[in-house]
Image: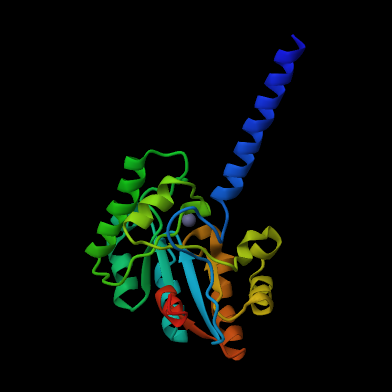
Amino acid sequence: MKRIIYIILIVTVIILLITFLGNELSKARSFQLFGDLVDHVETEEHVVALTFDDGPGIHSEEVLQVLDEQEVKATFFLTGEEIENEPELAQLMADRGHEIGNHSYSHERMVLKSPSFIEKEVQKTNGLIREIGYKGEIHFRPPYGKKLFILPYHLSQHNQKTVMWNLEPESDPELARDSEKMITYVEEEVKPGSIILMHVMYENRKESLKAIPGMIESLKEKGYTFVTVSDLMQDQGN
Ligand SMILES: [Zn+2]
């Protein structure tokens, strides 16, 4: 009897450990098991990539206007479903010279899903990105930054890179509700080759949208140039 309890205990600990490690691995920002992952690049140049996740959403045109005014090219990771809903907005982003990335079709977590589900999410969205006329390389950013085995494997088989980020002011709720604090945080933390993540597409992200012009201006003052993710990676010769 004692032995059975002992075995149950050990098995439970092992299961908990595997779950914990799997979870840690799935959300790791700078590591995955297959294929290329980029969360920043090593460079001496004062270059930085501004990336926006989700959408196209209702604030797309405002964001595009800010970027035009600032003469900044950014990278938009869009979902297939939202491209289908707002193809004109997505096309506008591509037409204005911004980079378009794949952020899955449905924005579900891409872990513990079947290979066919993952394939459909990635390939259908690649197709939609081509339909809006985008011709550049299409990188993938996992929804919620989650990936484990099948997604990285699928991407590696199709030569698509995983693009994460190393600066996300909105991850701290204290900063997220104050545009000025987000601007200061990025100004202090930025390094050559940083990839900044912001969400500005929806109504509940107004503070983030408000932060964009100030964020761009403060980094320009520090001597930074804004480039797309692909251009940033070329800087490193990646
Ligand atoms: Zn997202």
- Left-right relation of 150 to 178: left
Q: Position of residue 88 (x, y in %)?
A: 28, 65
Towards the viewer: 148 or 50: 148
Picture quadrant of residue 101: bottom left
Picture quadrant of residue 137: bottom left
The vertical placement of 90 against 191, above or below, is above
- Left-right relation of 180 to 235: right
The vertical placement of 118 against 89, above or below, is above
Q: Position of residue 105 (x, y in %)?
A: 35, 51
Identify the residue at image location x=51%, y=59%.
Answer: 203
Identify the residue at image location x=71%, y=61%.
Answer: 174
Identify the residue at image location x=32%, y=41%.
Answer: 116
Identify the residue at image location x=30%, y=72%.
Answer: 136
Q: Name the image quarter holding the C terminus.
A: bottom left
Residue lying at the far front in this picture: please name it: 3
The vertical placement of 103 against 3, above or below, is below
Residue lying at the far right in this picture: please name it: 2
Q: How is the image coloured?
A: rainbow
Q: Name the image quarter holding the N terminus.
A: top right
The vertical placement of 180 against 172, above or below, is below
- Left-right relation of 180 to 115: right
Q: Position of residue 48 (x, y in %)?
A: 52, 79
Q: Position of residue 71 (x, y in %)?
A: 43, 86
Towards the viewer: 174 or 151: 151
Q: How many marks?
A: 0
